[in-house]
Amino acid sequence: MAANANTLTNRLKQQPWGLWWLQARRLTRIEVRRNLLSWRASWIYFLAFVPAAILLIHAVFDRFDSRNRLDMSDDTMVLAGIVQFYYIRLGVFFGCLGIYARLIRGEMVERSLHYYLLSPVRREILLLAKFAAGSFSAILLFGSSIIAAFALTYLPYGTAGHDFVFNGPGLAQLEAYLAIAVLACLGYGAVFLLLSMIFRNPMPAAMLVLGWEAINPVLPSILQKISVASYLRHLMPVSVPGDGIFALLTVETEPVPAWAAVFGLLVLIAVVLAYSCYRIRRLEIRYTTD
Amino acid sequence: MNDRIAFENVSKFYGEVLGVNRISFSIPPGITTLVGPNGSGKTTLMNLMTGLVQPSSGQISVLGIAPGDANAFFRMVGYCTQFDSFPRGLTGYRFLFDSLMLHGIGEYDAFRLASEALQRVRLSDAAGRKIAAYSKGMRQKIRLAQAIAHHPRVLILDEPLNGLDPMARAESLALFEELGRQGMHLVISSHILDEVDRISDRVILITGGYLIAEGNIHQVRQEVRDKPMQVLVRCDKPELLASRMFSVNHCVEARLHGDGKGVFLRTADIDEFYRLLNDVAIEGLVKIEAVAPADDNANAIYNYLIGSDGSAS
């Protein structure tokens, strides 16, 4: 047993970790460039920044119309609703679908994936670097959008807004929203990356995931663990009362500590990525049938 | 490390469709031409060789390394595929530079190797232009440059002459010949057999997923015993030579060359034929200037073994 452990340790030490790290960094850089500096990514920019744009319009025009002015606690609730209902359920969901599904499936559609598969890079490194690039792009877009939305929510309140952010709970809420966005990008990203490797058209499968996420709160607790949004729900710093159809999305489930929610989601991501690595080892280039 | 590209009993099925079946060969360094009709399994064989598809059964190794070991394998293998597509938005130079950077080399080395490869395929002037604006021939060249940029020991080329004008074809063939002389393995599939044939050392004939013949072109030709060999003899009296040779029963066909200064003779016994030709030369009746096999090439072997309809005879 000890001998086996030693052999494994020696084998791990002999692996070219430095080269893998270098290749992963370079691949990530190439992929980030493709993700962000492309006209075809413009709809993802739109998805990410549309709430910030709407908040900007409100911030500009509501200044001159006292009838439309809400109080800060209402706006805090509005922001929490935007994060929970728009970013997590729609913006990040579809944005990640666009970013991560392109990484492997998009290159198969464009018939350019073989260049990577013919390079001296382990396929697992290729997959993980692509995932890292997708995550960097998605987190950059949605993270900055959430920061912009947060700033545009509290800037119009002047000194009161400043106090709420820096001397009140504001900054902690922003941190929580950013953490939720990061975890949402990683979680949905891992799922969509895998779906894009399994299905020629990942869209129907993504719609099933969307439906699954929506009904997940009313499922038995064991099934709730197979969901990205269910983990994120427990991290929300402000609970949003749900009315009508939104009630389905805000069902109170059994409470889970934040650390357990984060750990659970990270385990889910790791499992999905491990299976994706297994799939890419067996991936074949057959563009005519793909 | 051995110096062979080896297939041992390799089969590949796409579901129930046969790709290649029980293929075995061992290729030494030099230029090997892969010959077969459309859909015969040539590209499948090349994709298997480079791990783009995986065998249903059997073993593949290139210079002793399996395609699964990407780090070691793709440092010594370059593959110019038939897929005429590229990552979007890249210039020719950027395409090569990015590829080379994945080898783990420094930026200066990547720049130097990319520039050298562009020069070798004579594409330096267009290096700064987007590949999307390239002509078909230029895209073929940039793919070739990408395959050779890292100085591989094995170069696999799937229809590398497609889309090239005659001048570029001649330049590419000269490059392949030079690389073959340097001791590299080159595996080339091409339907322009007349041109590739001039530089090939060996041939692999494949049809319907089955290996029909493999080896040195001359050896393979000699093994096709049911097809008499054709020899062109350049001489001053071709009619006289034809009548003399035709009187021997192993000589089955004689045809005058178009310029009237030679004769194509077809014989069922090449050794006996050469012996008799020596006798004729010694007798002095005919002044023989040159003797050369006329169907000892991949094109003729293809026609004899596979036929124009693509079905093996």
Image (spheres, grey):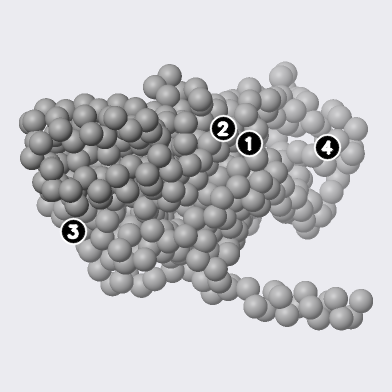
The circle drawn on residue B21 is 1
What's the CA distance linking mark 1 and mark 3? Answer: 40 Å
**Identity, as a three-letter code, of the amino acid under mark 4:** Gln
Q: Which mark is residue B209?
A: 2
Taking the image as shown, residue A108 lies to the left or right of residue B31, namely: right
Q: Is residue B233 visible?
A: yes
Q: Closer to the camera: disc 2 or disc 4?
A: 2
Residue A128 appearing in the image? no
| Co-location on one chain, circles 4 and 3 | no
- Is A267 placed left or right of A170 in the picture? right
> From mark 4 to mark 3, how far is it between C-alphas?
59 Å
- Judge by depth and name the residue closer to the eye, B86 or A218: B86
Residue at the image position 51 percent from the left and 25 percent from the top? B313
Mark-to-mark CA distance, 2 and 4: 50 Å
**Kind of residue sitting beneath label 3:** Gln
Question: Closer to the observer: label 1 or label 3?
Answer: 1
Q: Earlier in the sequence, mark 1 or mark 3?
A: 1
Where is mark 4, residue-wise?
Answer: A224
Q: Are marks 1 and 3 on the same chain?
A: yes
Q: Determine the residue positioned at 26% across, 34% down.
A: B245
